[in-house]
């Protein structure tokens, strides 16, 4: 699951949500789909956090990376 791209994971999550909203599945399958959705949410959140960390780093003149700081993040 973690090897998939973020966009693919989101499409999987959207499909599960549609299935659950349709209400055409029994309780056991609903629980399985809900559990799978929670796993997808975790993986997507982790991918977003990693992307945010990468974006918030800037390269210094020496070529090293440092955390990007704004007035709001002091």
Image (cartoon, grey):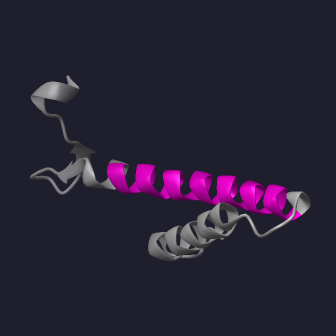
Question: How many callouts does the rendering have?
Answer: 0
Residue 63 as seen in the image, left or right of residue 13: left
Q: Position of residue 49 (x, y in %)?
A: 43, 49
- 69 and 13: which is toward the camera: 13
> Height in image: 3 above or below 26?
below
Residue 69 found in image quarter? top left
Q: Residue furthest right?
A: 28
The residue at the point 85 percent across, 64 percent down is 29
Q: Is residue 38 magenta?
A: yes
The residue at the point 51 percent across, 68 percent down is 10
Prevailing secondary structure of the magenta residues: helix
Residue 48 as seen in the image, left or right of residue 15: left
Residue 30 as seen in the image, left or right of residue 66: right
The residue at the point 60 percent across, 73 percent down is 15
Q: Range of the magenta residues?
A: 29-52
- 39 and 24: which is toward the camera: 24
Q: Residue furthest top?
A: 74
Q: Position of residue 40 (x, y in %)?
A: 62, 60
Q: Position of residue 58 (x, y in %)?
A: 19, 51
Residue 12 found in image quarter? bottom right
The residue at the point 23 percent across, 52 percent down is 64
Locate the C terminus by quadrant. top left
């Amino acid at each position: 699951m973690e090897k998939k791209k973020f966009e693919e994971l989101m499409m999987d999550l959207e499909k599960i949500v549609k299935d659950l909203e349709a209400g055409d599945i029994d309780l056991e399958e609903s629980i399985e789909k809900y559990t799978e959705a929670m796993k997808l949410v975790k993986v997507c959140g982790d991918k977003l956090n990693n992307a945010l960390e990468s974006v918030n780093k800037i390269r210094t003149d020496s070529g090293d990376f440092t955390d990007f700081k704004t007035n709001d993040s002091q």
